[in-house]
Amino acid sequence: MAGSVSRRAFLRGIIAAGTGLVASPLLGLSSAGAAPAVKLAVARGAMAVPLAQGFGGSGLPVSVPREQVYVVDQIFRYSVANNFNMFVPGGPPTPSRQGLVMDNLWYIDQDSGEWINSLAADRPTYSADSMTMTVPLRHGVMWSDGVEFTADDLVFTVNALKNNPGLVFSAEMKLYVNTVSASDPYTVVFTLNEPNPRFHFYFTARYNAVYMMAKHVWENATDLKTFTNYPPVSLGAYVAMDSDPNGYWELFKRRDDWQQTTPGMITGQAGPPYILTIFYGPSQSKVIAMARHELDVLFDLDYDAFKPLIDSTPTARSWFRDFPWAYGNELDTRWFGFNYTVPPYDNKDVRWAIALALDIPALNTDYIGGVAKMTVRTMTIDVGNGETFAPYDPDAPGRIATFASQQGYNVPTDPDGLRERFGVGSWKHAPDIAEKLLIKNGFSRNSSGKWQLPDGRSWSISMLAAPDENDVYRLALGFQDQLKTFGIDVNIETLERDPYTTRQNTGDFTATSTWGALPINAHPDIWQGLNSLHSRFFTPNGSSTAGAGSNDIDRFRFPELDALIEQMGRLTPEDPQVLDVGRQVMQFWVQNMVRIHTISFKKFITQDTQYWNGFPTAEKPTRQPLYWFIGGRFTFQQIAPNA
């Protein structure tokens, strides 16, 4: 093996190099094995924030004592910097910073399901006909400039959204709100255009919800779409203090009056004096930063980077201490989507053929490390000539467990344990059935075995992927590899997060590796997510779904789905029929292979406990670990310095 080194050994080496230790796996290589050293130089040169630079000999770009600043993985570089107008679709970024300076009426903790009254003092009340909604507000919440948050701010926010089409949530406010008024400084009454017992869902945060505008600030803006809201008057426990104009980091300082913010009121804890969000770059750079104790929590890593980190850094750990390590309870799933306006992807047989040509359990083991769950639904499909096929594979979790066991990890063997750890199953890998579906629809193979479209042209697929979202990118590579074996060439377009999102939202793609889910919150009622797929919100290619009330980046229109959405909307959230209609939606979803779902939204959310403690774990799930969601504001608040 002289002159070669495994990727995992290489990563252990760069951890050692990054911490100034002897990089033993990289020593003793012959000249033929010099590539890893070159890779190390490239990996370090690609860092967004060079670790060798900073204040006081640290790699941090701010002059704050290390023991006073909690350093957070920023996830991606912000292409729009020094702008906190988060109401502009595709504009200023939202991860983490939204929870530090913005606020919502209600939250649902995404791990426990706990309902949290934040700016609202209690849950909303509806009239018997669901035509009015009344909201009581919490007393004593202060904006960072010393002005109290009151009903005037909520009323102003809703009217501003109604009157400015194209802002985030403007379409929904215009559609549902007739009038909104303050009956006193702490009570707001909504009169709706139609009965909607779920209207409060738009103000109840999962990732985000309707943010509040400071009336005394925003009423002076001449154009709400170009207003930067910078520096922001904060409604969170922190204020923006400093930032990199190129979007690589932001520094936030804890407010002196943090006890007059909802994170302080609800948790009773102060949180770190400073929070620094920083984008170090790819997984290797994050690994070095955390090994040097210059990153306290990170969003995610690819598996080959994660394992060497925890093996080499005693203070680092993820949600679980052992396999599968990663947090797997986030509501989203990873999926491959197609633009329905681009033939042949509007044909469900073609979508099914692609799904069956893929080996989804192998995507999990070979590209994700076998640490994610898989989700499916039992059914049969029509292959043609009177033949049907049952695509569901209930044995897939067992194969993932076998893979993990062969790696030396302890895994459950009972059915309940397998289901909890690895999901309920997957679609079968059935390239023979995929071939029959394609031939049935006029496709053919050429003399080289490559697939041709019905018109005789070579079939190739262009797929978007964002490398800073590790699983999205690795699954795209798996998609490319597996379909090449099947006879379809795939080109991966790698994009930074902002252009990736913009192209999805505007329909400027053929296929995409992405994520999402029908549930908008940790609640069995999936109406809000479904409603964003109703045809009345349909957005043509070239126009952005963001700000239009739509999550239908695929550009599909299904009258049957519209009818189910409307049926669910007529029910109250507590009606048991909601679950029945939800099951009908799921049946329709899989029968039509609307999207090719692959694995759960697992995250190697990894923390370093060198300086700080209190971040949630599987043993102490005090708050959701999804810190970049707006609900992460409560997670940050419980972080405390080590003694």
Image (cartoon, rainbow, N blue to C red):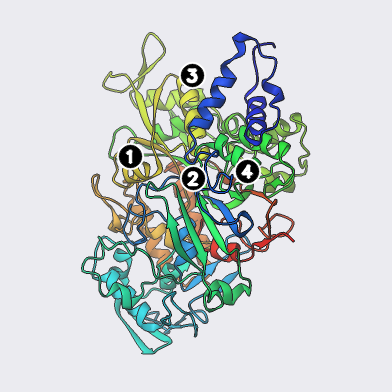
**Chain-order first, disc 2 or disc 1:** 2
- Distance from label 2 to label 3 (Cα)? 36 Å
The residue positioned farthest toward the left in the image shown = 222
The residue sitting at 60% across, 9% down in the picture is 32
User: How busy is the neighbourhood of tag 4: few (under 14 within 10 Å), some, or many (20 plus)?
Assistant: many
Three-letter amino acid code at disc 3? Thr
Q: Which residue, given by chain and number where applicable, does mark 3 sit on? A: 485
Q: Which residue, given by chain and number where applicable, does mark 4 sit on? A: 290
Q: Which residue, given by chain and number where applicable, does mark 2 sit on? A: 279
Name the front one of labels 2 and 3: 2
Name the front one of labels 4 and 1: 4
Query: Mark 2 near mark 3, Cβ–Cβ under 8 Å?
Result: no
Vertical comparison of 332 with 231: above or below: above
Residue 57 showing in the rendered view? yes
- Distance from label 3 to label 1 (Cα)? 23 Å
**Chain-order first, disc 2 or disc 4:** 2
Q: Nearer the viewer, residue 372 or 232?
A: 232
